[in-house]
Image (cartoon, rainbow, N blue to C red):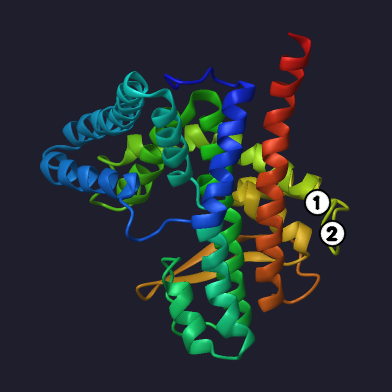
């Protein structure tokens, strides 16, 4: 928990809301040091030192890596805030607000989607492909408008969880230290959680741990997206909940399918399909029903759903807190 505020409390809710607003206003300025960059450097150094030897040894060291990086991120965050609180509670609150904002990416995610949508709307496929290549791992050199739109919509939908709602979930349970621990788990998965010969054993614990900490936030996010869609004109609400429950397990990730399937069904488009990675073809199960072809318009729709989704998620998490305060 945070050394400053009680978990799942009204004061922590207010701090988290302020952090969301700060992220929306400033995003991640390139000149400001970011905790995830430091986490990445530590992970890279430990991976180079520990990822060798027999499979069993790599598996054990990979589990220890999770303990060191996730636990260390929590401990450093807690210790920093505790030390600042000893100097000045106001200084510590300002630091916790700033740390919480670094775990969120609402502004950055919207900007990434618009970076693809802008040139696509102008008919500049080359620039749109370049923009998409910055946020996805698939080859983008031959993608048409529909496939470029699909990549952007999938990115916005999937990253609504690990970029916004999951950090909010863990922040409300334990303040900035727990939100930083979540980002450490997410960074571990993105760096060593791949199903490749190099990381198959060493990164297994990282991938499993990331799946665990995203399990509930991913499903709550799908519900929040559906609730937000009631206020967004043009959303296709009929059958979206049932279709999402049916389709989400098709996704190779146990969690990413939930926001992607919900967005696909709310927009009336089909996500998934054939992707190419360094010349290798990969077919991902399709989600949603293609009631209309994917186009640049759907990127903007996905961004609106993303913003509505995190707002509805905050309301879902905040109502029990408010109710508890009123009844206490």
Residue 145: percent from left, percent from top:
61, 83
Pick the residue in front: 312 or 325.
325
Residue 46: percent from left, percent from top:
17, 41
When asked about the image quadrant of residue 326, the answer is: top right
Q: Please, which residue is most extreme toward the right here?
A: 238
Quadrant containing the N terminus is top left
Residue that label 1 marks: 240
10 Å neighbourhood of mark 1: few (<14), some, or many (≥20)? Answer: many
Quadrant containing the C terminus is top right
Which residue is located at x 61 percent, y 89 percent? Answer: 122
Residue that label 2 marks: 236
Which residue is located at x 72 percent, y 16 percent? Answer: 325
Secondary structure of the residue carrying numbered label 2: loop
* Residue 224 visible, this orientation: yes
Asked if disc 1 and disc 2 are in contact, CB closer than 8 Å, the reply is yes
Q: Please, which residue is most extreme toward the bottom here?
A: 123
Asked if 37 appears above or below 327 in the picture, the reply is: below
Q: Please, which residue is most extreme toward the top here?
A: 328
Pick the residue in front: 274 or 327.
327
């Amino acid at each position: 928990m945070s050394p400053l505020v009680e978990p799942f409390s009204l004061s922590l809710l207010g701090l988290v809301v302020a952090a969301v607003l700060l992220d929306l206003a400033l995003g991640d300025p390139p000149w400001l040091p970011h905790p995830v960059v430091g986490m990445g450097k530590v992970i890279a150094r430990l991976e180079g030192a520990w990822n060798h030897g027999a499979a069993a040894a790599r598996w054990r060291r990979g589990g220890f890596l999770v303990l060191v990086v996730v636990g260390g991120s929590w401990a450093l965050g807690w210790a920093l805030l505790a030390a600042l609180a000893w100097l000045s509670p106001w200084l510590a609150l300002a630091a916790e607000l700033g740390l919480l904002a670094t775990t969120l990416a609402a502004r950055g995610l919207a900007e990434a989607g618009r970076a693809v949508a802008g040139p696509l709307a102008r008919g500049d496929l080359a620039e749109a492909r370049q923009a998409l290549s910055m946020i996805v791992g698939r080859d983008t050199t031959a993608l048409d408008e529909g496939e470029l739109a699909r990549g952007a919509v999938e990115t916005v939908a999937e990253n609504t969880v690990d970029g916004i709602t999951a950090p909010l979930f863990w922040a409300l349970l334990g303040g900035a230290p727990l939100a930083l621990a979540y980002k450490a788990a997410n960074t571990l998965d993105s760096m060593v959680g791949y199903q490749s010969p190099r990381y198959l054993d060493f990164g297994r614990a990282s991938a499993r741990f990331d799946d665990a900490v995203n399990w509930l936030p991913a499903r709550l996010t799908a519900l929040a997206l559906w609730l937000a869609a009631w206020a967004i004109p043009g959303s296709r609400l009929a059958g979206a909940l049932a279709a999402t429950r049916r389709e989400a397990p098709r996704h190779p990730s146990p969690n990413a399918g939930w926001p992607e399937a919900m967005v696909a069904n709310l927009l009336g488009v089909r996500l998934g399909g054939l992707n190419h990675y360094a010349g290798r073809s990969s077919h991902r199960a399709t989600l949603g029903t293609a009631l209309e072809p994917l186009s640049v318009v759907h990127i903007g729709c996905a961004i609106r759903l993303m913003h509505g989704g995190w707002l509805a998620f905050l309301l879902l998490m905040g109502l029990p807190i408010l109710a508890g305060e009123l009844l206490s």
